């Protein structure tokens, strides 16, 4: 494992456009339950899964009732708002600050990458901390709308301040399309990347699972190195999509990678005229 960690650090240090794809395996280390694992939300509560499959249909048919149920019912997602990032999240944020990681594309809706300090985050399945307009995809902080007051005054659903469209949770429900702006930007990042870290995802949920495969399809124009950091092998491992698998917890492995990267990027760069300077630019 140590050799793979060192190899990954070397590859990241030399990359020009590295991106990270992250999934539930990163969030479970922050105490957030996954969905279909042995202790998953839907494994323990099949009724919650059934309701999740109905959410988008309810919104389309009756946005007001969707909001009433959302605000008065029991959340099967748990307390995501107060969850805290773990060392894996902070490690990715640090790679971004070093200008080595260009973006994080995440399946997770928990906002933990942003809490850890990552600035370029594409929430592929939405963000629990935001509202999104069904018409124009504009996003808002729920605090702007005094939702409790709208409920008490029977004025739900909230309406978009840009186009007057109906607002919903930013979370992408079953049978709902990935928001066009996120899908477009994610594909653009995949098209540019020469290194992809796949962190804590089983790579079975589509269309997110297509992104690593898309990266390999661009091989005629450039080579993309794909490195998995997962507790178990995935279809990407079995199909030969990934080049390397580092098996273990992201919260343990990613910080080790960052430490190895620092060893490679903190050396003085040849030709630098500043005394005792240790530039964080990678040596190309």
Image (spheres, rainbow, N blue to C red):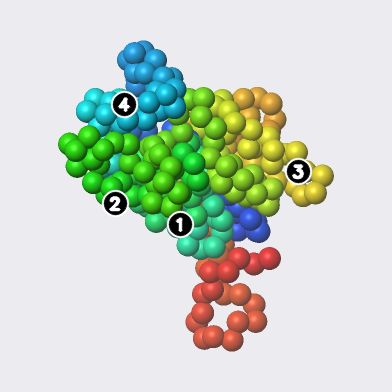
Q: Earlier in the sequence, mark 4 or mark 3?
A: 4
Q: Residue at x 56, y 46 (%)?
A: 181
For discs 2 and 3, the disc positioned in front in the rendered view: 2
Q: Earlier in the sequence, mark 1 or mark 3?
A: 1
Q: Are the residues flagged by discs 2 and 1 in contact, CB closer than 8 Å?
A: no
Q: Where is 119 relative to 77, above or below?
A: below
**Which residue position holds label 4?**
65
Q: In whole angstroms, how far apart are the C-alphas of marks 2 and 3?
A: 42 Å
Measured as percent of width and height from the top left, residue 65 is found at 31, 26
Q: In whole angstroms, how far apart are the C-alphas of marks 2 and 1?
A: 22 Å
Q: Which mark is residue 119?
A: 1
Q: In whole angstroms, how far apart are the C-alphas of marks 1 and 3?
A: 26 Å
Q: Residues within 10 Å of mark 1 (few under 14, many from 20)?
A: some
Q: Secondary structure at mark 2?
A: helix
Quadrant occupied by the N terminus: top right
Q: Which mark is residue 218?
A: 3
Q: Residues within 10 Å of mark 3 (few under 14, many from 20)?
A: some
- Along the line of sight, the residue nearer the viewer: 176 or 205: 176
């Amino acid at each position: 494992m140590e050799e793979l960690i060192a190899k990954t650090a070397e590859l990241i240090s030399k990359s020009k456009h590295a991106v990270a794809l992250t999934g539930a395996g990163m969030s479970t280390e922050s105490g957030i339950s996954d969905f279909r694992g042995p202790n998953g939300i839907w494994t323990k509560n099949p009724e919650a899964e059934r309701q999740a499959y109905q959410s988008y249909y309810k919104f389309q048919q009756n946005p007001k009732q969707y909001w009433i149920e959302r605000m008065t019912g029991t959340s099967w997602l748990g307390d995501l708002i107060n969850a805290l990032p773990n060392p894996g999240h902070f490690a990715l944020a640090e790679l971004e600050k070093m200008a080595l990681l260009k973006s994080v594309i995440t399946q997770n809706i928990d906002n933990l990458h942003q809490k850890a300090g990552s600035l370029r985050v594409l929430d592929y399945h939405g963000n629990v901390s935001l509202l999104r307009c069904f018409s124009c995809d504009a996003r808002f902080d729920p605090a702007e709308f005094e939702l409790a007051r709208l409920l008490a005054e029977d004025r739900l659903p909230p309406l978009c301040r840009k186009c007057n469209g109906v607002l919903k949770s930013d979370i992408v429900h079953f049978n709902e399309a990935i928001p066009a702006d996120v899908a477009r930007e994610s594909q653009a990042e995949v098209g540019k990347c020469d290194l992809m870290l796949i962190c804590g995802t089983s790579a079975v949920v589509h269309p997110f699972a297509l992104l690593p495969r898309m990266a390999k399809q661009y091989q005629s124009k450039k080579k993309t190195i794909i490195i998995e950091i997962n507790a178990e092998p995935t279809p990407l491992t079995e199909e030969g999509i990934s080049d390397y698998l580092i098996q273990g917890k992201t919260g343990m492995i990613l910080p080790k990678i960052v430490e190895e990267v620092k060893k490679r990027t903190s050396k003085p760069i040849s030709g630098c005229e500043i005394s005792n300077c240790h530039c964080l630019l990678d040596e190309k």
